[in-house]
Image (tube, helix red, strand yellow):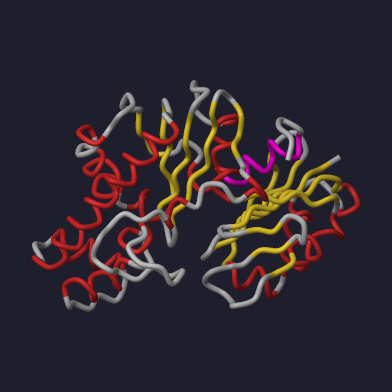
Amino acid sequence: MAFLCVDIGATNTVIGTGKQDFETVEKYSTRYFFENTDELVEAVVRESSHELEDLEHVAVAAAGPIDRAKGEFYPPNLSKESFNLREMLSGYGDVKMMNDATAAVAGEYYYGRNSAEDMIYLTISSGIGAGVIVDGEILEGWGGNLGEVGHMEIGKDGVKCGCGGCDHWEAYSAGDRMPLMAEQLFNRNYKDSREIFEKQEIGDRTAEKVIDKMQECNARGFENLINLFNPEVIWVGGAVAQNHFEKVVEEPFEKVEDGLMNQEPIVEENSLGEEAVVHGLKAACKGEFEL
């Protein structure tokens, strides 16, 4: 029987289907997915060699808090209301739900370029989150929401986070928040984080200060993760990290040694790219681990 995997990100949603492996993987905007769920799922299945009635296993990951008991997900960039993912997808099979970073670390562990039993998948995108494996076991926490590391307190500047708190890692380093950090700390307006990186490349002094602050906070974030979970490998994904890996990951990581109590791990760009999450969902569908 076939499986259906749905990765609901803050900006884009990836849908994959297949049997032993993916036969079809498609990407849509998340807003469009919520508006046309059945149409898009059915289109992806039709592109494979299966019919809707062949679907048995359904797994969905969400970039934000989930409530497994209720089957609900709160999408940060779309609405103040939750969406019941189980109701939306239950017509296609028994629905399993995961945090997206947890699914991503499972994908790297089972199908990626992995040789470690202790590893972290860190996503730096519109938000920041982490999936964690310790001694070969996936850590999910109560309700499946372990890994909201973007909301650990990193700075001391009173910078507002999207959650309403202050000085969280996301407030300084998430793609959606960097322009607000620039405005609050340096009194400069940028239309988005891409412009900040572009202006820094051509010598914009304020953009350089913004990037320096982001790197300082990323270094502290890496230190916290390493001291908490003692990983052998940290895989890093997410659009902001992947598009600016040197600035967002490599340069900050050069500054972590003085703050470490544990051995320094290997830090690399994730090997499965933007399909890491759906590969982790595939592992759940195939029974590689229990949810």
Q: Is residue 257 above or below residue 236?
A: above
Q: Position of residue 21 (x, y in %)?
A: 70, 36
Q: What percent of the width, then of the height, locates residue 149?
A: 45, 50
The reply, left or right, for residue 193 in relation to residue 15 is left
Query: Camera-side residue: 78 or 74?
Result: 74
Q: Main secondary structure of the magenta part?
A: helix
Front-most of 118 and 151? 151
Query: 133 or 262, which lies in front?
Result: 262
Q: Quadrant of the C terminus?
A: top right
Question: Which quadrant is home to the N terminus?
Answer: top right
- Is residue 138 shown left or right of residue 287? left
Q: Nearer the viewer, residue 93 or 159?
A: 159
Residue 46 magenta: no
Q: Quick check: is 281 in the magenta stretch?
A: yes
Residue at left offset 62%, top offset 46%: 278
Residue 199 % position (x, y): 17, 66
Magenta-colored span: 277-286
Q: Residue at x 86, y 54 (%)?
A: 52
Asked if 193 appears above or below 137 in the picture, the reply is below
Q: Residue at x 59, y 37 (%)?
A: 139
**Side of 288 where 95 appears, left or right:** right
